[in-house]
Amino acid sequence: MFNARLVNDPFGDPALYLDLRYRREALLFDLGDIHSLPPRMLLKVNHIFVTHTHMDHFIGFDHLLRICLGREKHLALYGPPGFIGNVQGKLAAYTWNLVENYTNDFRLVVTELHPDRSETVNFPCREAFRPEMERQVASVGETILERDAYEVKTLFLDHKVPCLAFCLEEKRRVNVKKNALTEMGLPGGAWLNALKDAIHRDEPGNTLFRVWWKGEDRGIAEKMYPLGELREKLTKITPGQKIVYISDVINSPENVEGIVEFARGADVLFIEACFLEEDRERAAEKYHLTAMQAGRLARLAAVKRFTLFHYSPKYRGMEERFEEEAMRAFQGEKE
Ligand SMILES: [Zn+2]
Ligand SMILES: [Zn+2]
């Protein structure tokens, strides 16, 4: 159901686009250079998770703001301690004297994550992005966003500043059996998403569920079924995907321990590798990983697949060495 892809090549500024296929929704992990994403894809994004606000991870903010301005949209952004001030500083760079007449309510809902709590502030466009006076404070654990079909978790890591790792865990996946749909004489449509959501919410089997579609003469046709019957006849339930995103960390024992636990068994791990192992001292100085360290983390976490990114530009033309080095470590050859 999820399609995750890095927006840029491995030398580009980090951003991972997570498309929830079949829904009008997408997520972004990090907000680096996003110019190559067409506006229609950016407009699908409702939740953005920023690991830290080094420039290469946050420079896309202005571009996104430009695309969303004047739209009816509540855009949620999540980031590390200090994040609300970072967003406020970006907004303060522009003049907003003509926005109060906009008919659409565009606002940024900015959440700053701390290990024990979250603080949220609204920045409404029509009020010249002046922040609400009071921060909404909530206690929050590992899970920072919970939806019917998935949840997003975070982990605090050390990059000489607090840096967040993110994990998207899809809940059980509800697959629709096409032939069963035909056998029941029911057309596909938006009701299938509602059915999946109801199953994810574990609604009781005797709940009456409305199946509807556009009938003849543009009217709406509908039939009611017990939810349990539709679940039984139409769907097959399989485990969901786990996607983990880790960018900008030092290979310290604490980070390694945290990452291995957090990423365990992931279907895909996206992990930074700024340097090659021959430059591991430089990597440690810069609080980054080498390709070998990234591959070793992927092995220790027993992930199914991993993808490297964030290569230092000095290695241009040497992409294959990153892959080879990381793959050797992943397969457990002598380090
Ligand atoms: Zn950084
Ligand atoms: Zn970076």
Image (spheres, grey):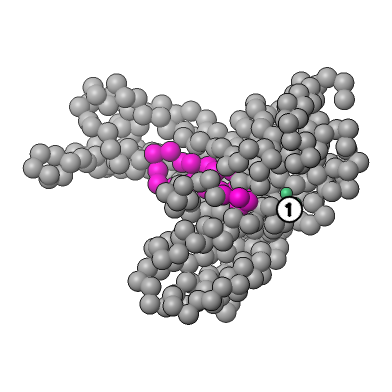
Q: Please give the count of numbered marks on the rendered protein.
A: 1
- In the displayed structure, 267 sits above or below 90; it is above
Amino acid bearing label 1? Cys
Residue 246 located left or right of residue 232: right
Residue 189: give x, y in percent of width and height: 28, 38
**In the drawing, does residue 281 fall left or right of residue 148?**
right
Percent coordinates x, y for residue 283 in the rendering: 85, 42
Residue located 82% across and 55% down the image: 160
Q: Residue furthest left?
A: 217
Res 134 quadrant in image: bottom right
Q: Residue at x 87, y 21 (%)?
A: 334
What range is drawn magenta here?
16-34
Position of the C terminus by quadrant:
top right
Q: Is 247 covered by the magenta stretch?
A: no
Q: Confirm or reject: label 1 Cβ below 8 Å from ligand 1.
A: yes
Residue 98 lies, with reference to residue 68, above or below; the image says below
Q: Nearer the viewer, residue 167 or 325?
A: 325
| Residue 19 inside the magenta-drawn segment | yes
116 vs 7, left or right, is right
Residue 232 appears in the rendering: no
In this view of the protein, which residue sits in the foreground, 46 or 16? 16
Q: How far from the left and from the top, in percent, is residue 91?
A: 58, 70
Label 1 neighbour load within 10 Å: few <14, some 14-19, many 20+: many
In the image shown, does 227 or 250 lie closer to the viewer?
250
Q: Image point 27% across, 33% down: which residue?
A: 188
Q: Which residue lies at the image location 57% right of the left edge and 64% below the top edge?
A: 110
**Displayed quadrant of residue 162:** bottom right
Q: For the residue labelled by badge 1, is the local secondary structure a helix, a strand or a loop?
A: strand
Extreme residue in the right direction: 281
Is any atom of residue 10 visible in this view?
yes
- Residue 232, compared with residue 77, is above or below; it is above
| Residue annotated with mark 1 | 163
